[in-house]
Amino acid sequence: MYLLKNAWLSITRNKGRNILIGIIFIAIAFTSTITLAIKNSANQIITSYVSKNDVEATLTLNRSHMMKDFQPGEENTEKTKKYFNKFHHLLKKK
């Protein structure tokens, strides 16, 4: 009983300090709750986005198709090089 009586006296004696501690505790609890709610909703949004938008694309160069139209000669070789370099540059941007 003595311990409880002294604890109650300590609480009532320092009302201003205890009110500030209570306000700080409530603010920390409030911000923690909001932070956890935001984190959970963000994780749910990410999960739903990944499950709905499952798209994967691959770009490749069909060399046999390119060589089918190739005709030997200086002029055609330059055209082929330009085409190949342009396509190769686009693949590197990925």
Image (cartoon, rainbow, N blue to C red):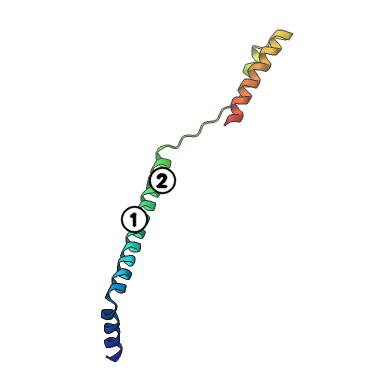
| Camera-side mark, 1 or 2 | 1
Task: Tell me if label 1 and label 2 are in contact, CB under 8 Å.
Answer: no
Residue 64's disc is none
Judge left or right: residue 12 versus residue 31: left
Q: Residue at x 36, y 51 (%)?
A: 38
Quadrant holding the N terminus = bottom left
Crowding near pointer 2: few (<14 within 10 Å), some, many (20+)?
Answer: few
Q: Residue at x 60, y 28 (%)?
A: 91
Q: Position of residue 68 (x, y in %)?
A: 65, 14
Quadrant holding the C terminus = top right
Crowding near pointer 1: few (<14 within 10 Å), some, many (20+)?
Answer: few
Give the residue type that dot 1 points to: Ile
Q: Residue at x 56, y 27 (%)?
A: 59
Q: Position of residue 77 (x, y in %)?
A: 71, 12
Judge left or right: residue 65 versus residue 23: right
The residue under label 1 is 34
- N-terminal of the two: label 1 or label 2? 1
The residue under label 2 is 47
Give the residue type that dot 2 points to: Thr
